Image (cartoon, rainbow, N blue to C red):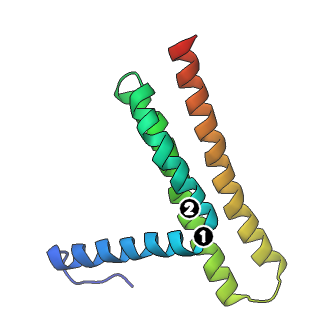
Amino acid sequence: MASTEPRGPRQILRAWQWSIAGLRAAWRHEASFRLEGYLLAVLFPLGLWLGDGAVQKALLCGSLLLVLAMELINSAVEAVVDKVSPEFHELAGRAKDMGSAAVLMLMFNVVLCWALVLWERFL
């Protein structure tokens, strides 16, 4: 049920704090998130430098952010599945595999975006 409490500075601050707590938890507990975070730290500035114009910069940098966002969703799904179904279940395994596949698809998207932009820029 949605909250009927009006949105104001206090609620926005709470939402911000919960989001930061989620990022910290992902960094602390998810090795994949840390690895993708390190890659973001290297590739994001490179994307800003290599992109020719706003659209290319958005493609190069935005594709990286999408991977991290999907990794957060995947980690959330995995945590809920582990909580609800600690023993193996085919559907639980399928849910986890599909979350992982979604991250993989966005990694393919990063490679495609970077390849197309860099191809156009340098060849």
What's the distance in space between the residues labelled 2 and 1, CA to CA? Answer: 7 Å
Q: What residue is rendered at 56% in x and 58% in y? A: 70
**Residue 107: image tag:** none
Give amino acid for label 2: Arg
In what element is the residue under mark 1?
loop
Q: Categorize mark 1 by other alpha carbons within 10 Å: few (<14), some (14-19), many (20+).
A: some
Q: What residue is rendered at 55% in x and 66% in y? A: 73
Q: In which quarter of the image is residue 46?
A: top left
Give amino acid for label 1: Glu
In what element is the residue under mark 2?
helix
**Along the viewing direction, whichever of 88 and 51 lies nearer the viewer:** 51
Q: Is residue 117 left or right of residue 12?
A: right
Percent position of residue 116, x then y: 58, 24
How many marks on residues? 2
Rendered-image quadrant of the C terminus: top right
**Residue at the extreme left of the image, as rendered:** 9
Q: What residue is rendered at 57% in x and 73% in y? A: 76
Q: Is residue 105 left or right of residue 27?
A: right
Residue at image mark 2: 34
Q: What residue is rendered at 71% in x and 56% in y? A: 101
Q: In which quarter of the image is residue 51?
A: top left
Q: Taking the image as drawn, is residue 123 in sight? A: yes
Q: In this view, does 51 lie to the left or right of 87?
A: left
Q: Are marks 2 and 1 in contact (CB under 8 Å)?
A: yes
Q: Categorize mark 2 by other alpha carbons within 10 Å: few (<14), some (14-19), many (20+).
A: some
Percent position of residue 54, x then y: 35, 29
Residue at image mark 1: 30
Rendered-image quadrant of the N terminus: bottom left
**Along the viewing direction, whichever of 2 and 93 lies nearer the viewer:** 93
**Along the viewing direction, whichever of 11 and 62 lies nearer the viewer:** 62
Q: In this view, does 111 lie above or below 51?
A: below
